[in-house]
Image: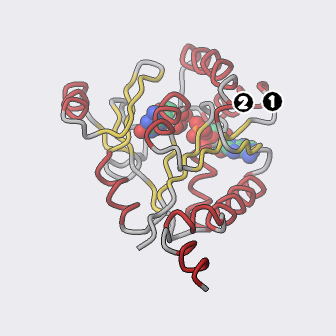
Amino acid sequence: MNKGLLIVLSGPSGVGKGTVCSVLRKKMPDLVYSVSATTRSPRQGEIDGVNYFFKTREQFQEMMACDALLEHAEYVGNCYGTPRDFVERTLAGGQDVILEIEVQGALKVKEKFPEGVFIFLVPPSLDELKQRITGRGTETQDTINHRMTVAEEEMNLLSHYDYAVVNDEIEAACHRIESIITAEHCKASKYLAELGELPAAIEKA
Ligand SMILES: Nc1nc2c(ncn2[C@@H]2O[C@H](COP(=O)(O)OP(=O)(O)O)[C@@H](O)[C@H]2O)c(=O)[nH]1
Ligand SMILES: Nc1ncnc2c1ncn2[C@@H]1O[C@H](COP(=O)(O)OP(=O)(O)O)[C@@H](O)[C@H]1O
């Protein structure tokens, strides 16, 4: 069985990762979303096990200690991490998995899964980014300022990614990502790696 694709959607806070990811999941229902663990408190309406697995610091540290996380990062005072087992089992079962994670974590995943598809969601401008973080109304002014400082540093890591997608308009950004995923599925090198015997078979013919 062919392994699924690991798709990593990253970019600064407020750029629209969550929004784009949820629209994308409706368009591509076969795409499996990896639910992260976090020590952040739930926001209104967030459900444990759906949006995040909400953990205490102790529980999170325990997950780290027993290597249950594929990657983890500290972000603006809270810990976030990707449960390893779920991702590995889902990929092995042939399904595509999407991670929606911040930039440091994405680069750690790249070390372990260089064959993954790394997509950086870019804001149309830093002013627009600030407006989006502020407009969402979930953060205090201090956190907004902190997230903006981090965002400017994160933008410098864009060159480590395979693709940059500008999130000017949600539908358009989703369409670009859909095209990337379709193209990645069509890459001949991936088929050849999976069907190692094919070149030999062609030679014999
Ligand atoms: N490294 C890493 N980052 C994550 C993970 N889950 C979520 N994040 C990122 O952590 C940052 C903060 O997430 P959150 O507090 O939910 O805020 P929001 O995504 O900006 O609404 C965002 O950039 C998320 O994409 C994870 O498992 N690992
Ligand atoms: N293309 C877009 N145009 C305008 N607003 C957007 C767009 N994408 C997302 N937003 C808004 O920006 C805010 C931050 O989006 P969110 O998905 O929470 O970002 P992230 O997950 O990257 O932190 C939300 O209020 C969302 O509705």
Instruction: Identify whether 15 is placed above or below 1.
Output: above
Q: Which residue is mark 2?
A: 129
Q: Is residue 108 left or right of residue 185?
A: left
Q: Residue at x 46, y 38 (%)?
A: 109
| Quarter of the figure with the N terminus | bottom left
Instruction: Identify whether 26 is placed above or below 174.
Output: below
User: How is the protein colored in the picture?
Assistant: secondary structure
Front-most of 10 and 89?
Answer: 89
Q: Please tell me in which quadrant of the rendered image residue 149 appears.
A: top right
Front-most of 114 and 144?
Answer: 114
Q: Which residue is mark 1?
A: 125
- Few, some or many C-alpha atoms within 10 Å of disc 1 (few <14, some 14-19, many ≥20)? few
Taking the image in four quarters, ligand 2 sits in the one at top right
Question: Which residue sits furthest bottom?
Answer: 205
Label 1: element kind: loop
Residue 175, x across and y down, in percent: 74, 61
Q: Residue at x 50, y 71 (%)?
A: 195
Q: Are marks 1 and 2 in contact (CB under 8 Å)?
A: yes
Front-most of 34 and 127?
Answer: 34
Instruction: Identify whether 131 is placed above or below 85.
Output: above
| Quarter of the figure with the C terminus | bottom right
Q: CA distance from mark 1 to mark 2?
A: 6 Å
Q: Residue at x 57, y 68 (%)?
A: 191
Residue 105, x across and y down, in percent: 47, 32
